[in-house]
Amino acid sequence: MKVELTSSTAEWRKLRRAQTARSRDALVELDDGALPRSDAARRFWSRRTWSELAAVPAVSQVVLALVREGASLTTIGAYTTIAQDEVRHAELSHALAERLGGYDDDVPDGLDYAPRSLANPSDVSFAVWALANGCFSETVSLALIRARHAATTQPLVRAVLAETLKDEALHVRIAWQTAGEVLPNLSRADRKDLAGYGDQLAEMLRRTFGTAGLPPKLRRREDALRDDAAKAGLGSVAAAHENALIDEALAGIKARLSKLGVTTR
Ligand SMILES: [Fe+2]
Ligand SMILES: [Fe+2]
């Protein structure tokens, strides 16, 4: 099967130009400017690092599926560029965590950040990865980062969020453009399978991007670190607000997917 996303070419080019410009200018330099020490914020930014790192294998799986399915080099290039953006987001998050008191590389039991397992060999189709990574993860992530950027007062942290926000907005546009070209052409049975998978993804995102669905004790701890980092203006918004934003984003995703013939619960 040839995966050719013809109408996406202009967005693709924009993505690649934006990235070339960024690597030249290095918009956010984390070498200067002191950050306050904050245990909540260093742990929050460690979680952001795990999340951005998980996006790297997820997008790489998209790239592999595109090659398997015979996509054009333009399409493949767009996704390798997105993968590189995600590496940069992970680097920036890691640098912030370090400067706020130290990056934490131990993912606590019960949290589903899984960069390593996402890197396992997979024969899952492009449509599935595009739905999971693009329509769900990128869209929810953009809603959160937009709110965090608006709520953050510390200038360096705000600059990192501003840079990430620009990238994620483009990733989301590309994701939905891709979905619009790929999903309606799938068989009814495939669209039904995808919808079921989308329901599972929605629950997973409530537990990873948000704290809803975590066991009570873990949830209290995860809520507290978001609330404390939010109070300090260091990158989070309050946990209850984040969970509400995720629900809102998921409702929006459900409506958009149903227009493309994928009807989730
Ligand atoms: Fe990202
Ligand atoms: Fe992204």
Image (cartoon, rainbow, N blue to C red):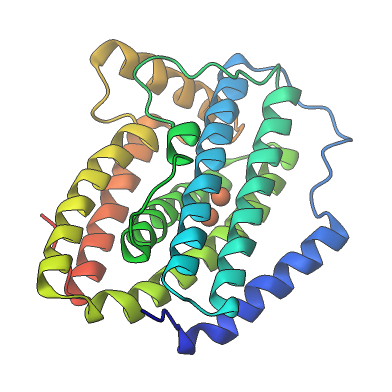
Residue 146 shown left or right of residue 245 in the figure: right
Of 74 and 54, the residue lying toward us: 74
Kindly indicate the quadrant of the structure image that contains residue 208: top left
At 60% across and 50% down in the image, what residue appears?
86
In this rendering, the answer to whether 230 lies above or below 60 is: above
Measuring from the top left, give residue 2's x and y in whole percent: 41, 81
Of 6 and 18, the residue lying toward us: 6
Residue 66 shown left or right of residue 158 in the figure: left
Measuring from the top left, give residue 119's x and y in whole percent: 48, 41
At 60% across and 55% down in the image, what residue appears?
83
Quarter of the figure that contains the C terminus:
bottom left
Quarter of the figure that contains the N terminus:
bottom left
In this rendering, the answer to whether 13 lies above or below 95 is: below
Kindly indicate the quadrant of the structure image that contains residue 78: bottom right
Measuring from the top left, give residue 222's x and y in whole percent: 40, 20
In this rendering, the answer to whether 60 lies above or below 69 is: above
Of 265 and 147, the residue lying toward us: 265
Report the residue that reaches farthest toward the bottom.
Answer: 7
Of 145 and 201, the residue lying toward us: 201
Q: How many labels were placed on the picture?
A: 0
At 45% across and 83% down in the image, what residue appears?
5
Measuring from the top left, give residue 39's x and y in whole percent: 61, 14
In this rendering, the answer to whether 24 lies above or below 182 is: above
